Amino acid sequence: MSKKRILLVSSFSPSLIHFRGDFIESLIHNNFEVYTAAPDYPEDIQQKLTVLGATPKTFKLQRTGLNPLNDLKSISELKSIIKDNNIDLVFPYTVKPVIYSSIAGNSCNVPVISLITGLGFAFTGLTFKARTLQRLNEFLYKISIRKNKVIIFQNRDDYALFLDRKIIPKENKVEFVGGSGVNLNKYETRVNNNISKVIKFLLVARLIKEKGIDLYIEAAKVLKNKYPEAEFHIIGEPDNSPSSIKLEKLNKLNTKGIIIYHGKQSNVPKHLYNTDVFVLPTFYREGVPRSILEALSVGLPIITTDTPGCKETVIKDNNGILIKPNNLNALVNAMEFFLINPEKIKEMGINSRTYAENRFDVKIINRELITIIKEEFNN
């Protein structure tokens, strides 16, 4: 029997290596022929995909904003990739690829299995723009994914929202996986015996309001006065989002010693290894945040919000603390818990690594995804 050809569609080509490289290897190992589609490929990403055994293809995509003409071009180019390469199954993830690839695949009578990796800015509902985008995205999801063979969610809250908003009917076949998974071999872990006053907190994220950067900074201001030895680290950089923090503000706070700002870093695992507690006070509609999965893998206690996607990463009183979203007092109290009880860092850190091994190991996630794909070919 000839190999089945699968097209993975992403809005950001580096994610095909960083988040899906192990998945691509697993697909090839299971006798699938893998094609990838993304808007652009830096030379190193294209080479890495080729070395893995995948065939990269390019299509135009306006990653942010809405332009009907550009959107129609994206769909048309995806249809051409599907037809020209005799694709047997389309597997898109992230919002626009899911919508456009579903329309393209279904119009070509090629089955689509879509992965919902979180609902993002449009479903935060914080601004008029977000609410407008939410209504538009709901409509686009409705017309694009209902014919998909399977819709895979990373958390059950997103599925409940899709049902509640009548984006999909109950008859749609759905599956659930625990995020993108993490290759645990790439994340060195350790038993953290630090019980000194120098407790290091770390936030790694897009530095936008929805990810909780402002809350984290305010908590740092409060706690720095009371615990001057504590350190509040930040990795990430501002972007062109209207809610993005200003670089000048970060630099000023860094100069004052309130935070330690590292900018964008290529070796995040090293920084995780050298800190004590991971903090992500997001109220963004996450799938399962990759940054938290990496922190779990290294063996860090987690402070995050009791919101879709995030709450899946913390077992209460076991490996971290869940707080109410957008609540400064809750965040301060959670961070202060580890300053008062540093011995809990060791215990909860060990539990985080164990939880990652049992639930978020990329081998487990990829095995689940490939089982879903194989079932569709066998039906």
Image (cartoon, grey):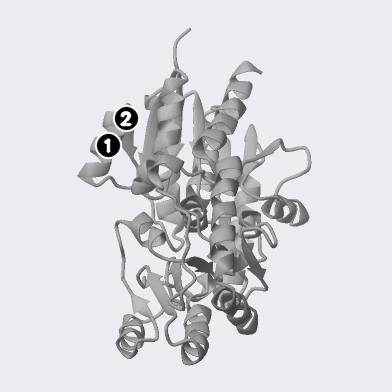
Amino acid beneath label 1: Lys
| Left or right side of 175 for 10 | left
- Of 325 and 140, the residue lying toward us: 325
Residue 220 vertical position relative to residue 193 in the rendered view, above or below: below
- Of 176 and 336, the residue lying toward us: 336
Residue 50 vertical position relative to residue 222 in the rendered view, above or below: above
| Left or right side of 161 for 45 | left
Residue at the location (30% across, 47% down)?
40
Which label is found at residue 306? none
For the C terminus, the quadrant is top right
User: In the rendered image, is residue 91 in sight?
Assistant: yes
Question: Residue reaching furthest top?
Answer: 1
Indicate the quadrant where residue 83 lies: top left
| Left or right side of 192 for 251 | left
Amino acid beneath label 2: Leu
Task: State yes or no: discs 1 and 2 in contact (Cβ < 8 Å).
Answer: yes
Calculate the distance from the C-alpha at mark 1 to the C-alpha at mark 2.
6 Å
- Of 190 and 121, the residue lying toward us: 190
Q: Position of residue 187 (x, y in %)?
A: 41, 48
Q: Position of residue 68 (x, y in %)?
A: 46, 56
Q: Position of residue 219 (x, y in %)?
A: 52, 83
Residue at the location (39% across, 47% down)?
15
Q: Which residue is mark 2?
A: 52
